[in-house]
Image (cartoon, helix red, strand yellow):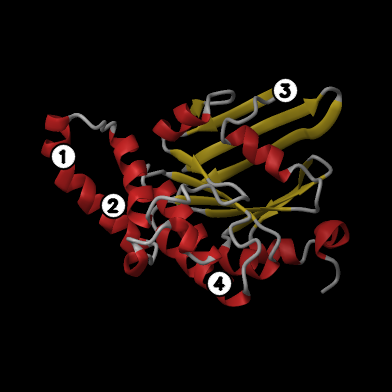
Amino acid sequence: MEILQVKDIYKDFSGLKVLTGVTFTVKANEKHAIIGPNGAGKTTLFNIISGKYRPSSGSILFKENEVGGLSPYALNHLGMCRSFQITNIFQNLTVFENVSAGVRSHAGLRYHLFKTLDRQSKMIARTEQIIEQVGLAEVKQRPAHELSYGQQRALEIGIALSSEPELLLLDEPTAGMTREETEEMVKLMRSVTENRTLMIIEHDMEVVFSLADTISVLHNGTILASDRPEAIRNDLRVKDAYLGEE
């Protein structure tokens, strides 16, 4: 079953054409990587799928519903969540407070006395579960700004998980990481997406080929190829455009 269908998406900014007919599909529970050279339009594509930008034309179907042009907030409530290249967390709140804020927001819980008392234990349990899932249980009471870079990215994923997304979009999840941090992030991404769909933009080809079920190559604003990793590795067009001969 296809959870996401991107059909003939165009995007231009004041006459500058960035995307010129992007079409691909993502299956449910698939790990799907978007790769391509700098300037290919990868982040613009993610911005359109996740609701930050409206497409100039084309269609985006999420769970068979047209969602092109919906806000990030609306998409989040439909089951889509996206992280950014730059870590987006509350630096002065603790790990627990960061994740708890996301859990409460998803549940529609506000700080009204009787509602809070009635549902507090469930919110705490869900928060603790997510923190454990992303490997931050030992630092849950530390402010986010005291965490290592890798831990901050794990926390960002934890916040994303608090909305219980069916489709998780991660933009450069391993950017700026050491090799050890990268390996831990790959393990984390595998773990937290075991029963959900993952889309990533990623430049580290070792990460891409070890993690992705399907790879789509964006080049000059359109999809050059979309296939299984081994087919992409051996595609002459992809080698010429991006991968090289290695």
| Residue drawn at point x = 59 percent, y = 47 percent | 84
Q: Which residue position is annotated with label 3?
A: 56
Q: CA distance from mark 4 to mark 1?
A: 36 Å
Q: CA distance from mark 4 to mark 3?
A: 38 Å
Horizontal side of residue 107 vs 57, given as left or right: left
Q: Which residue position is annotated with label 4?
A: 181
- Pick whichever, 136 or 3, lies toward us: 136
Which SS class for mark 1?
helix
Q: CA distance from mark 4 to mark 2?
A: 23 Å
Please determine whether, in this image, residue 182 is positioned above or below residue 52: below
Q: Which residue position is annotated with label 2?
A: 127
- Res. 241 visible in picture: yes
Q: Which residue position is annotated with label 1?
A: 119
- Pick whichever, 207 or 121, lies toward us: 121
| Residue type, mark 4 in image | Glu
| Residue type, mark 1 in image | Arg
Horizontal side of residue 41 vs 162, given as left or right: right
Q: CA distance from mark 3 to mark 1?
A: 43 Å
- Determine the residue located farthest toward the bottom in the rendered image: 180
Q: Position of residue 228 (x, y in %)?
A: 63, 60
Q: Earlier in the sequence, mark 4 or mark 3?
A: 3
Q: Earlier in the sequence, mark 4 or mark 2?
A: 2
